[in-house]
Amino acid sequence: MTYLRRNELPTLLRAIHDPPRRLYLRGAGSHDVLRGPAVAVVGARACSPYGAQVARMLGRDLAAAGVAVVSGMARGVDGEAHRGALESDGHTIAVLGCGIDRDYPAAHASLARAIAERSLLVSEYEPGVPPAPFRFPARNRIVAGLCVATVVVEARERSGALITADFALEEGREVFAVPGEITSTLSAGTNALLRLGATPLTSAADVLETLGIAPPERETHRHPLLELLPATADELARATGLPPGEVAAALAELELGGLAGEGDGTYRALA
Amino acid sequence: MLARALTFALVGLEPRRVEAEAHVYDATPAFTLVGLVDRACQEAKHRVRTSFRAAHLRWPGRCTVNLAPAELKKEGSGFDLPIALALLAASGQVPHERLAEHASCGELALDGRLRRVGGVLGVAEGARRAGLQKIICAPDACAEAALAGVEPIGARHLSEAVAYLRGDGEPPAFVARDGRPQHVSLDLADVRGQERARRALELAAAGSHNMLLGGPPGIGKTMLARRLPGILPPLDRAAALEVTRIHSVAGLVDPDHPLISEPPFRAPHHSASTAAIIGGGPRLRPGEASLAHRGVLLLDELAEFQRPALEALRQPLEDGEILVARAAGSARFPASFQLIGTMNLCPCGARGDPGAQCSCSPQRIAAYRARLSRALLDRFDIVVTVPRPRASELQAPSGEASEAVGARVVAARRRLAAATPGRSAAADELLTRAVERLRLSGRGRAKVAAVARTIAALAEAENVEPEHIAEALAYRSPPELAP
């Protein structure tokens, strides 16, 4: 079992008010991942489709820019952020509130394996320690502590994600909040953060700018159809000369990738 | 003296043997007709009596005619001829033995001419099954009767039937007309633009998928749907007979070319009642769903149909037939059709039209869409939203003709019938990813998989590949209709 002692911890984590005594590690990722630029993406477990979509997009775009995406591997926003990072073959760190050998939540066992294959799962608890509610806030200080910035995607008024944001603020780290509908209780927490002065986040580029990282050139791998949006499938078929079946397939792939969406027959670029 | 003539009554599509028994005795002239006959049948008394006079036949004195079995309800005017012939045999004006070799069916005009009635094919099939080889009917019913494999005797007039039975002369022999009726099929070449909807139509034809077309009014949804039968393969002989039988009962066959060998197309108006759509009524007639058997049922403005009528369609969509139960008995009508629905995207119709401003509130739109039950929407494998085309599109060159599309449809159907295409590992992976990402239900997943198989068959691919799954995903139900 590998672990880092307090004096071996990454600088950022060691700098917090109450750094863990030990940090247990699981996974094939190099320890250097912990020392590279990292951003926390956290939020509600019972998130909306919007929240899930944004978390996935942020995970994907941040990881693609070489930033490690840190989260708590909970259901909802956390899980989507990890998945997004894995999608773009980037690094992601799951901070657990139990022993690193426990798969919690059980529904995320396969996600845990996928993370372990490429990156790291970390915990301050010894292997075998069961999950417990009082351990999650403590876990959140490590999530915030590992990162230069914390993004809250969706959070109710008294959400665990806000605890993470509080830790980040206490340590003087950057806090971003994703604006949501003022009528949605799922956005009450994030909107409250915004009122308190958190930076509104509109794309992964906002975070990357703070880190001084140039967003990767999207134009190079941008799908040519995206340049033609918004448009109907028929207009695309005519503009590209492709058979309608191929256009339909390409659009469905873009939808799956979260890059385009359809409404009333018109496709729009999302990213 | 007693005599009988044979005919058949149709219960639904099923012929049941009916004997017209006539008893004639000397007394004050009177005519009694019994045997659970309906109004039209009761009126036969007057038509038969008047046509005897017109044909210069002797009216027997007192007579009673019973249509047996008395428990079976007799409907319509087709019993006129058997009643007349039974009376003639009972009064010794035509020979019994010769009459017993024939079935008969037809309505008598007041001048004695013979008129064709609906359901002749069913009656003729009953005759064949009862071991009779000949049927006396109106001349314009001969072609239909001949389809059942019995010899039709086309009598123009009651006196001609009498002369024939007496052996005094043959009515003009029935000669089957050659050739097929001039089929005025609508061609897909008339449709300009609408590439996606055309493609979806081709898929629907190849895989027999039910399809829902959404979009603002006046963009050619109906025009497209009407062109679906033109790209479907023709019916084989057995299917054609099945379809003709249904249309015959409804009195909808062409007398010269009765066999319906093209897939039928039915488009009932949205004010249609449940009985009009699924069949029934006091006379147990096939409804639009049965008339569309082995063809296409177009429900234009789907959301405007009465909800009970739409819900009644779920049974035939599931079972391919309709069971109409009445106090008097039940009838089974085949109803295996391809359903095409069209609807606007909102009650005012402006949604999806870039040039118009939709004035509908979200609540109204939700109420409009809620008129269709989830269960019915689940039956549509392909859902396509057709936005309003730009003016430039209408000047586009005309599209591919139906003939070319139809050839691909036939080839794809053959491939699908020969073997169900498997799914490659990559396609499986994409489907799983899509289910997770787009939150497809189990049925949603099955529909995507089925449409993808059709796409693969059209592409002449061995297996369903990721690109086929991807395209099928583009035709899935939008979440606001069926999540």
Image (tube, rainbow, N blue to C red):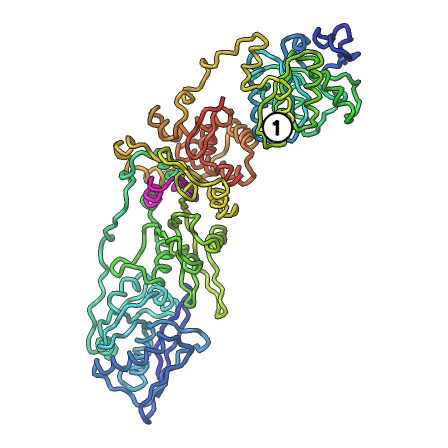
Q: How many marks?
A: 1
As rendered, which of B390 and B444 lies closer to the eye?
A: B390
Crowding near pointer 1: few (<14 within 10 Å), some, many (20+)? Answer: many
Indicate whether B95 appears above or below A195: below
Q: Between B320 and B272, which is closer to the camera in this rendering?
A: B272
> Which stretch appears magenta?
B204-228
Question: Viewer-proximal residue, B110 or A35?
Answer: A35
Q: Amino acid at mark 1?
A: Ser
- Relative image position of residue A137 (x, y in whole percent): 75, 22
Q: Is residue A94 magenta?
A: no
Q: Quadrant of residue B409?
A: top left
Q: Is residue B471 above or below residue B303?
A: above
Residue at screen point 34% across, 44% down: B222
Q: Position of residue B333 (x, y in %)?
A: 43, 59
Residue at 44% across / 78% down in the picture?
B70
Q: Is residue A211 left or right of residue A143?
A: left
Residue shown at 36% from the left, 75% from the top: B41
Q: Is residue A97 left or right of residue A228?
A: right
How far from the left and from the top, in percent, is residue B171? Answer: 21, 71
**Local SS, label 1:** helix
In this picture, is A223 found above or below A156?
A: above
Residue annotated with mark 1: A187
Quarter placement of the N terminus of chain A: top right
- The residue lying furthest to the bottom in this view is B27
Q: Chain of mark 1?
A: A
Residue B112 placement: quadrant: bottom left
Residue B348 in view of the camera: yes
- Tell me where residue B316 appears, x and y as whole percent: 47, 53
Q: Is residue B414 visible?
A: no
